[in-house]
């Protein structure tokens, strides 16, 4: 039986992307993105919760994210959830959940409208399908 591991997030970057290279030369970019949820409680009080996610992009997608995204920019990220662990310098085991991006859609234009930047795509409902030809790169 086949499984499904798919995550879709729309939010704002909380950090500038950080690009590095693996020992074999593959580019990898990571950044944090915040997704907000607004709701009204039973007593009528309005609330807003923010959930933070770490996103990891590889190869050409890593290079594009590093080039065109920045703190505060809005993006749609689609990928899979990946959990990993490692031993810290203090000897304790650390755990992290990351979204390994398969596609990233830039939803707004950079401040100042710099030439050569992709214009971002059409905003879509979070449950809608995003096809390769809909991506701005």
Image: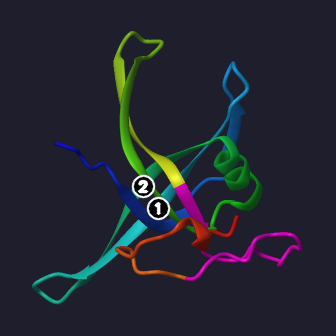
* Residue that appears at 38% across and 29% down: 84
Q: Which residue is mark 2?
A: 52
Circles 2 and 1: CB atoms closer than 8 Å: yes
- Relative to residue 126, is residue 17 drawn left or right? right
State whether residue 103 is above or below residue 119. above
* Residue that appears at 44% across and 16% down: 88
> Where residue 134 appears, x then y in whole percent?
58, 73
* Residue that appears at 42% across and 55% down: 52
Q: Is residue 106 something one can see in this rendering? A: no
State whether residue 108 is above or below residue 14. below
In front: 48, or 137? 137
Q: Which residue is mark 1?
A: 34
The local crowd at label 1, few if under 14, some if 14 to 19, many if 20 or more residues have their Cα within 10 Å, is many
> Where residue 64 appears, x then y in whole percent?
72, 54
State whether residue 72 is above or below residue 84. below
**Hey, which residue is sitting farthest top in the picture?**
91
- Relative to residue 74, is residue 110 drawn left or right? right
Residue 62 among magenta residues: no
Q: Which corner quadrant holds the C terminus? A: bottom right
The local crowd at label 2, few if under 14, some if 14 to 19, many if 20 or more residues have their Cα within 10 Å, is some
Q: Secondary structure at mark 2?
A: strand
Residue range in magenta is: 103-122
Q: Secondary structure at mark 1?
A: strand
């Amino acid at each position: 039986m086949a499984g499904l591991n798919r995550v879709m997030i729309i939010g704002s970057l909380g950090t500038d992307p950080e690009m590095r290279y693996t020992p074999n030369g593959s580019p990898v970019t990571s950044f944090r993105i915040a997704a907000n949820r607004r709701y009204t409680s039973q007593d009528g009080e309005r609330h807003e919760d923010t959930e933070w996610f770490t996103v990891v992009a590889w190869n050409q997608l890593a290079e594009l994210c590093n080039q065109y995204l920045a703190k505060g920019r809005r993006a749609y990220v689609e990928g899979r959830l990946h959990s990993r662990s490692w031993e810290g310098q203090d000897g304790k085991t650390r755990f992290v959940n990351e979204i390994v991006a398969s596609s990233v859609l830039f939803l707004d234009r950079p401040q100042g409208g710099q030439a050569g930047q992709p214009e971002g795509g059409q905003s879509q409902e979070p449950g809608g399908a995003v096809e390769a030809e809909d991506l701005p790169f």
